Amino acid sequence: MDKQFFSDQIALLELDYRTDMPVEEKRSWWSEFQNAKPEHFAEAINRLRRGDGRPESALPFMPKKPEVVRALEGSAHRDALETWTGLMNCIRSGLIETAKIGPKTRYAIDACGGIRKLQYMGDDETPWVKKEFIEAFEAYASAPVVPMIDQRIQERLK
């Protein structure tokens, strides 16, 4: 996520809660959440807002980092469930061989035994395989972004 998008989301919270977040706290939040997907961060912030038309479950005070972390985890879990459902639909319809599978989904498929395991698992195995898939998907989603090539490796390649 870029810093301007992050700042805009924080400004929404500040407006709703009628308070200014201290600069040092903003820096701390940026450090914590800069690698979050923008759509997940926006969804988490929207769930925590309390302006007009917002749900009754909004917090009475400006949220702290742990509340945002919990809201972000909910977004990753929903993504994992939606991906599992879509994957199972592809398998059942016989379209899995032509489906485009991203790295996060590929990682989760491999973690729970591979595509053949998913195709031939029995009904008694499904809940356990689904749990493994979702855990792996969420773990991949929450992993920090790492630069592709470290500076030392670049120097060795020259």
Image (spheres, rainbow, N blue to C red):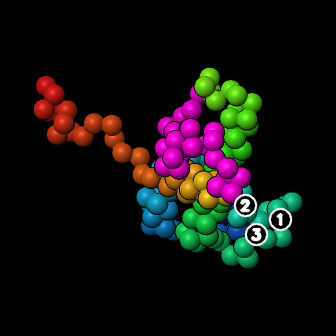
Label pair 3/2, CB-CB below 8 angstroms: yes
Left or right: 150, with 129 as reference point: left
Tell me the residue at 53%/50% (across/down).
112
Is 87 rendered above or below residue 40? above
Instruction: From the image, tell me which residue sits under label 2.
Output: 47
Tell me the residue at 55%/69% (across/down).
65
Location of the C terminus (image quadrant): top left
Using the numbered discs, state the Cα–Cα distance from disc 2 to disc 1 in whole angstroms. 8 Å
Residue 25 drawn at (x, y percent): 49, 67
The crowd level at tag 3 (other Cα within 10 Å; few <14, some 14-19, many 20+) is: some
Tell me the residue at 56%/38% (across/down).
115
Q: Which mark is residue 131?
A: none
Give SS at disc 2: helix
Tell me the residue at 63%/41% (across/down).
120
Label pair 3/1, CB-CB below 8 angstroms: yes
Give the amino acid at mark 1: Pro
Mark sitting earlier along the chain (2/1) = 2
